[in-house]
Amino acid sequence: MRLKFILIILALISIFFFGIYQSPMQKLKSDTVFNDLDMPFWAKQENGKTTLWSKATSYCGSHDQKPNCGPVLQVLVITNGSTVIPAYGSSGHNLTTPSFN
């Protein structure tokens, strides 16, 4: 009886955990802002040249309006030295940094 109760509890915990867990890519595709997908998170991914970083930059390159793509694109700009910064959430408009030549 006790073993059956423990197994039921473990099953419920598993269903709860797997039912609410979202991978970083699922979060990236969401319209809800996730604070854990910040610049330090993506900088760590970029520094490690992870598969997640590759997938995120590919996705955000064509979905720059997604709110969670902002930090990805910012890290991409910083690491590549670009002067054109996508202003996420702005319907695809870009910000251009001034030239100080």
Image: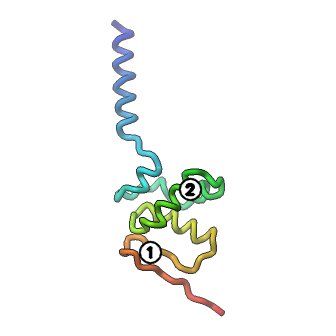
Q: Residues within 10 Å of mark 2 (few under 14, many from 20)?
A: many
Residue drawn at the location 43% of the way across and 56% of the way down = 28
Q: Quadrant of the N terminus?
A: top left
| Residue nearest the observer in this picture, 53 or 41 | 53
Q: Looking at the image, is mark 1 or mark 2 nearer the viewer? A: 2
Residue 29 position by quadrant? bottom left
Q: Position of residue 99 (x, y in %)?
A: 60, 89
Gap in angstroms between the C-alphas marked 1 and 2: 20 Å
Residue 46 lies left or right of residue 30; in this view the side is right
- Name which residue type carries label 1: Ala
Local SS, label 2: helix
Which secondary structure lies at badge 1? loop
Q: Badge 1: few (under 14), some or many (20 or more) residues near its Cα, within 10 Å?
A: some
| Residue 66 % position (x, y) | 39, 64
Q: Earlier in the sequence, mark 1 or mark 2?
A: 2
**Image disc number at residue 33:** none
As shown in the figure, which amino acid type bears the numbered disc 2? Trp
Residue beneath the point at 48% across and 53% down: 36
Residue, far bottom: 101
Residue 59 drawn at (x, y percent): 47, 60
Q: Position of residue 25 (x, y in %)?
A: 45, 51
Residue with the mark numbered 2: 53
Residue at 56% x, 56% y: name it: 53
Residue shown at 63% from the left, 91% from the top: 100
- Residue 87's disc number: 1
